[in-house]
Amino acid sequence: MNTITILWLRQLKKYFRSKSRIIGSMGQPLLFLIALGFGFGPIYQKAGGGNYIDFLAPGIIAMSILFTAIFSGIEVIWDKQFGFLKETLVAPVSRYEIVLGRTLGGATVALFQGAIVFLISMLIGFSPNLVLLPFAIVFALLISLFFTALGTAIASMLDDMQGFQLIMNFLVMPVFFLSGALFPLTGLPSAIYSITLFDPLSYGVDGLRGTLGAVTQFGLLTDFTILGVMTVIALGIGSYLFSKIQV
Amino acid sequence: MYAIETKELTKKFGSLTAVDNISFQVKHGSIFAFLGPNGAGKSTTIKMLTTLLSPTSGMVTLNGFDVSKDSNEVRRNFGIVFQDPSLDDDLTAYENMELHAVLYKVPQNEIKERIEQLLNFVELWDRRDNLVKTFSGGMKRRLEIARGLLHHPKILFLDEPTIGLDPQTRNHIWSYLIKMNKEEGTTIFVTTHYMEEADKVADQIAIIDHGKIVAQGTSAELKEKTKTQSLEEAFIALTGHEIRHEEAAKGLHMRHWRSAARRGS
């Protein structure tokens, strides 16, 4: 076994051992799917949008990936506080290998979480087109990687969880609400629309939606290119900041 | 070439100078005790020696490799047992050991055997599949030490390794360390508050206080210098209350002067 594999495995073990985390992180997507899905469904239908659950489900899958991935990245802070990070930082391996193993582990966990929500949403009435499912998985993976890397980058610069609320309110929530996960981006005031174009999750949500059978806003190729490039950049920045950590 | 060498090593945190211009050498195969009261700068020094913290100024080399420039090469040369916990509580004892073995590239076919040997050594083999969060403080400490000994480094840093352990375990662990030192020539750099421990094992002792090295030499030399009978007395003579108060007052004075200067500007 090598460094990357064992650190990847560590993230998975920690996740699957924490039953409360798995169950807890299913609550929010479930609530959103039921409350919003059934709540706005009739209006959406009346407005000529079609089946709202089919529209909403990819957005909620993206949301659960976003939250899980950011949390996985932020775990670096916990490891800093509880000391385990030191153990990896003094080891005779490149810090890039360490951060890569951690990020892949976090992204795998987020992907798994997305898969659970995908199944739940099908129980609630989501009926996706499964022809392009492999491509949907690619988009889910890109979202997972991007936000784990982003969480890692942020956590590398922080020393404790004090700033966590700030990150939730001024980064994670806006990224979620302005991504078009809950509503179509067409017909938005142009100022708001411009903001959504700078939100990486917009392309992730759109990509998922497009591959799972609904209409895309930007086109799948655009979604893939922009999200792909952003993911590479985020991985670069996250790894760099992680490699500069001092404890 | 020395195993460890520092020249005018300094670390500042804002206006606080945690480590102030210290220079020392540690010979290959020796046991070097680095002593000092709490907050003297021991752990900060160890962090700089082990690439966790970069120095404000000065130089450190381990086996000739510069800590700031060749940090990857430096990391191949040492192992460390930290003062504060660094285990993953959500993994089992065995998994913590295994992770360390992989990070330190212990040959695949030796991993199982070595883990079993060392967990037996610290009497945790029966608990190998328990999560570390269920362990008592002493058990965690023992696991931490076993993990530090898993790969056989050329230089071993031990930051208060035996703190919180009973005399039996302390003796047990020290006899293992001394054997490693004798048979494999492992250089050991240790900080401890147990003076009799340092007296017994160390070839060289350096005493640090307020970030500065106040004395260096063998235990006998330190006793002679301070005209005391034991290392403990020598330690207190060198770092005792009178000196501390004077130094603290000076520090306070400095701080006043600095904030006055800041207000003035």
Image: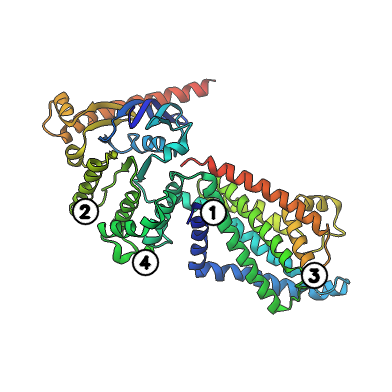
Q: Quadrant of residue B226?
A: top left
**Discs 4 and 2 lie in a common subunit:** yes
Name the residue that disc number 2 marks.
B169
Residue at 28%, 36% (x, y): give it. Answer: B37
**Discs 2 and 1 lie in a common subunit:** no
Q: Identify the mark nearer the N-term, 3 or 1.
A: 1
Task: Label 2, secondary structure: give it.
Answer: helix
Q: Which mark is residue A213?
A: 3
**Amino acid on which the number 2 mark rests in the picture:** Thr
Circles 4 and 2, Cβ within 8 Å, touching? The answer is: no
Residue at 66%, 74% (x, y): give it. Answer: A119
Task: State the image coordinates of residue B121 (x, y, percent, origin top left).
Answer: 25, 57
Side of A89 relative to B191 (left or right): right
Name the residue that disc number 1 marks.
A102
Q: Is residue A141 above or below residue B209?
A: below
User: Does the image show residue A181?
Assistant: no
Q: Is residue B258 above or below residue B118?
A: above
